[in-house]
Amino acid sequence: MPVFTRFRQSSQPGIPGDESETEREERAEVVTAVVGTPAPGSRLAHLRAWRTRRPRAARALRLTTTALAAALVLGALLLPNTLPAVEPERFARIPAEAVVGAVLMLVLPRRPRLAAAVLYGLGLTALTTVNLLDMGFNEYLGRGFNAALDWDLLPDAQAYVEDTLGGGVATAAAVGAVVLVLLVAAVMVAATIRLGEVLARHRLRATKGALLAGTVWVTCSALGLTLFGGPIASERGAGALRVHAQRTVESLRDEAAFVQQSKADTFGNTPPGQLLPDLRGKDVIFTFIESYGRSAVEDPIMAPGVDRTLDTSTEALAKAGFHARSGWLTSATYGGSSWLGHSTTMSGLWIDNQRRYRTVTAGDHLTLTKAFQKTGAWDTVGVMPGVQKGWPEEKWYGLDKLYDSRDLGYRGPKFSWSTMPDQYALEAFQRQVHGKKRDKPLMSFVILTSSHQPWAPLPKPVGWDELGDGSVFDAIQKAGNKASDVITDTTKSREEYGKSIQYSVTSLTQWLARYGTDDTVLVFLGDHQPIARVSGDRASRDVPVSIVAKDPKVLDKVADWKWTDGLKPDRDAPVWKMSAFRDRFLRAFGSTPHPSAG
């Protein structure tokens, strides 16, 4: 009867009801002895029989499961949020969250402990998810994930994968991401429950261990002790969640402040007759080259080819009577979200996230393109081969007519994300818009896309008279690299990126030399740097910007900008924020400020 006596005592009032696993097994054996054995073939019976036959294997399995659970929890608590930081020494830390979690499991009764373990596991899932999102955003956009702003970018990411690697891959990636989060949640919850049970089963030893770990953590923290270049006492998990929470709060506050900021405009009440008087009669073209960043001009892998192209293009334009001056602008975005760079340049506002973009495009803030429209002295058009569906921002930009991918008559193949080669888009622009006679000069807003990631396959120049409907590019596209081969190879991505910039710059400058007139003024620039994997860690956000014209009076207007002669800006050429360009351009060409209040 000693076994029955122990069982009765463990369930008496006043005795902690926190049974260990051993006690539960003994009680189960007693119940089995009284009411019968488990049904033959049942899972419990099979497990018990296996444990009985192979006690060593069962013990090894328990120890392995516990070790894996501990490794998962510690790994989640210490996981960095950037890929370069994922190194073994980063995990040689004592996380405060693990010590606190252990203490919590030791003091709670069974049911509250189970609930706490589940919540702890879900918290680790959230931490792991935001760290992985941070890794992706840092790798591609050079910044961390913002929970208040960036969920809207996930559908764009899926669309990019679909255009680049196909619909099947995009669907698989989306489903895989959801399954991965659910799997992480299940594994983390199972791990925390397992550890909670182990701690409760060995309460005395676990209490001593938690006390020792806490003492070591406090000592290391107080003395500032480090290991492998980092603090031994870590609070990485809580710190990461705190940073994300602060980032979210700051973003919400920023949105409210930006609403008021966007209502104020230096030129908001300027009469049409006082806007851009020194450009009257000129055909002005604003052109963005996708991902044309400072790295293309200065990186040792990309720069040699790009610099040769810029020098050659400068000489070719000079022979055609054109001259250029170039500087740097610091983009509001990095690695992607090109529309943020476009809108920042044209609006004079710093638009570095999607909510700011939605706020400003829903209002009537004066864009540089709209300033031309407001004068009534120009026809204004947009040429956007990357737009494949309705684009309501057309009105905000002040465009009388938009030519998107469906309007340019292209019948050739897509080049990954880019719907058509830049050379074709420019020729279509000439044929359908720029080359036609009109009563007014033309202001054009052109977005070129051939240098868009993943830079495979890439188009190659063909004779301008051979472009036709674009079918000439079929063989070039088939012979090009596969996106999947380039996107996973950093060195090849950098090489192909450089080639794509050479192609885009060559196409644009050849078009200008071929079709430009004495009254043509071209402003072209990059929208942002390429992704961090290509531009490099801690690369600047600078992009080149150039103004090209035949009329020397145009460049004389910007002489005090101290820009570099030619298409390649010097390293020490002036660097402005991209949002400063609109007002500087308007002032340089004679516009008179008449502010509107916020």
Image (spheres, rainbow, N blue to C red):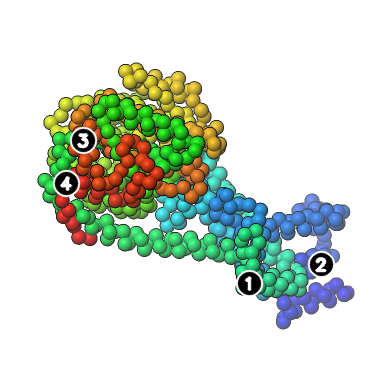
Could you give the CA–CA distance between mark 2 and mark 3, rounded to whole angstroms?
Answer: 96 Å
Residue 204: percent from left, percent from top = 76, 73
Q: Amino acid at mark 4?
A: Gly
Question: Disc 3 or disc 1, which is closer to the eye?
Answer: 3
Q: Is residue 90 visible?
A: yes
Could you give the CA–CA distance between mark 3 and mark 1, rounded to whole angstroms?
Answer: 67 Å
Relative to 230, 29 lies left or right: right
Could you give the CA–CA distance between mark 3 and mark 4, rounded to whole angstroms?
Answer: 16 Å
Q: Are marks 1 and 4 in contact (CB under 8 Å)?
A: no
Q: Residue at x 37, y 31 (%)?
A: 311
Residue 55: percent from left, percent from top = 85, 57
Relative to 304, 13 lies left or right: right
The secondary structure type at the circle numbered 1 is: helix
Please say if 270 is above or below 23. above
The residue identified by callout 2 is 26
User: Quick one: label 3 or label 4, which is nearer the N terminus?
Assistant: 3
